[in-house]
Amino acid sequence: MNRAIKTILLVVGVILLAYGIYTMVVPEAKISIGDLDLVKTPDNTNAYIAIVLGIVAVALSLIKEKSKNV
């Protein structure tokens, strides 16, 4: 793999990891009306997908090519 592609994969992987972790950590919106609290149960499916894709992209960027000894 060429060096530019590896760099792009590394940057994209780090961004996806950061986005996935951010969406899991940031709490969902709450609505309070007096004593009544309406809280939406968070669905972290998209966050898990982003984290897995980020890990795969980082892993692919770190794979070394076999040296050709001819």
Image: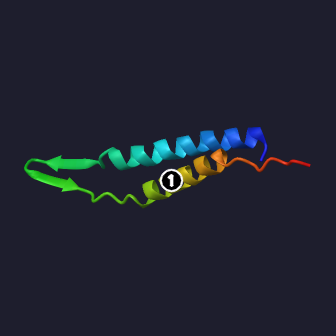
Q: Which residue is under mark 1?
A: 50
Residue 18 drawn at (x, y percent):
47, 42
Quadrant of residue 14 in the image?
top right
Residue 51 drawn at (x, y percent):
48, 52
> In the picture provided, is 25 more to the left or to the right than 30?
right
Q: Nearer the viewer, residue 1 or 19?
A: 1
Q: Nearer the viewer, residue 31 or 45?
A: 45
Check disc 1 and report its element: helix, strand or loop: helix
Residue 41 drawn at (x, y percent):
27, 59
In the rendered image, the residue lying farthest to the left is 35
Q: Residue at x 27, y 57 (%)?
A: 40
Quadrant of residue 48 in the image?
bottom left
Q: Residue at x 14, y 49 (%)?
A: 33
Label 1: how many Cα within 10 Å (few below 14, some 14–19, many 20+): many
Q: Nearer the viewer, residue 18 or 32?
A: 18
> In the picture provided, is 16 more to the left or to the right than 2?
left
In the rendered image, the residue lying farthest to the front is 69
Quadrant of residue 26 in the image?
top left
> In the picture provided, is 22 more to the left or to the right than 50?
left
The image shows residue 38, relative to residue 19, as above or below, that is below
- Type of amino acid at the residue the image marks with label 1: Ala
